[in-house]
Image: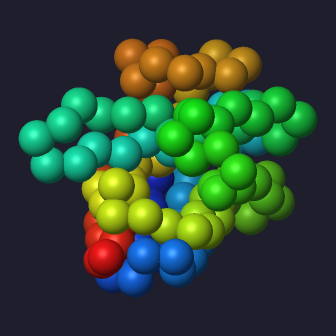
Amino acid sequence: EVQLVESGGGLVQAGGSLRLSCAASGFTFSAYAIGWFRQAPGKEREGVSCISSSGCTIHYADSVKGRFTISRDNAKNTVYLQMNSLVPEDTAVYYCAASTYYLAARGVEYDYWGQGTQVTVSS
């Protein structure tokens, strides 16, 4: 059974940090690009960051560039999203997803999705 399980969300004050994890199982993790998406109430889902299967290529949305860092450990089947200098606009449910594309920017390019973890940033 394919699973992507996000963890690490929570409530943090503006300026704080959180580290999200995405633990994968049930598929060949090292062959998939992994993306992080987020969706705030009343807003469309937004791509945050993605990393290629080898970790060599990374993309960030402009809104998080310089504040968020994506990384992966293929030995542990896990992808991380380090989020620093958080602002209230980062409040959303964060999802990780897996894609067979080399580096996928669009949600429709992803095959598997996690259930999400809530991140709330207070002002």
Left or right for 114, reference 27:
left
The x and y percentages for residue 110 are 47, 25
- The residue closer to the viewer here, 2 or 96, is 96
Residue under the point 64% across and 36% down: 60
Q: Please determine whether, in this image, residue 8 is positioned above or below residue 110.
A: below
Residue shown at the point (64%, 17%) measured from the top left: 101
Does residue 84 appear in the picture of this structure?
yes
Residue 1 point in image, percent of width and height: 42, 47
Q: Residue furthest front?
A: 123
Indicate the position of residue 43 as horizontal and vertical percent values: 19, 37
Q: Work out whether residue 77 can be spotted.
A: no
* Left or right: 61, with 58 as reference point: left
In the rendered view, would you say 109 is above or below 77?
Answer: above
Query: Where 60 falls versus 71 (above or below)?
Result: above
Q: Nearer the viewer, residue 26 or 97?
A: 97
Give the farthest residue toward the left.
Answer: 42
Q: Quadrant of the C terminus?
A: bottom left
Of residues 66 and 110, the one drawn nearer to the viewer in this rendering: 66
Residue 34 location in percent, x, y?
61, 39
At a point 49% along the width and 67% down the height, the residue shown is: 86
Task: State which quadrant residue 65 falls in.
Answer: top right
Quarter of the view holding residue 30: top right
Colour mode of the rendering: rainbow
How many tags in the picture? 0
Above or below for 96 versus 46: below
Residue ID at (11%, 41%)? 42
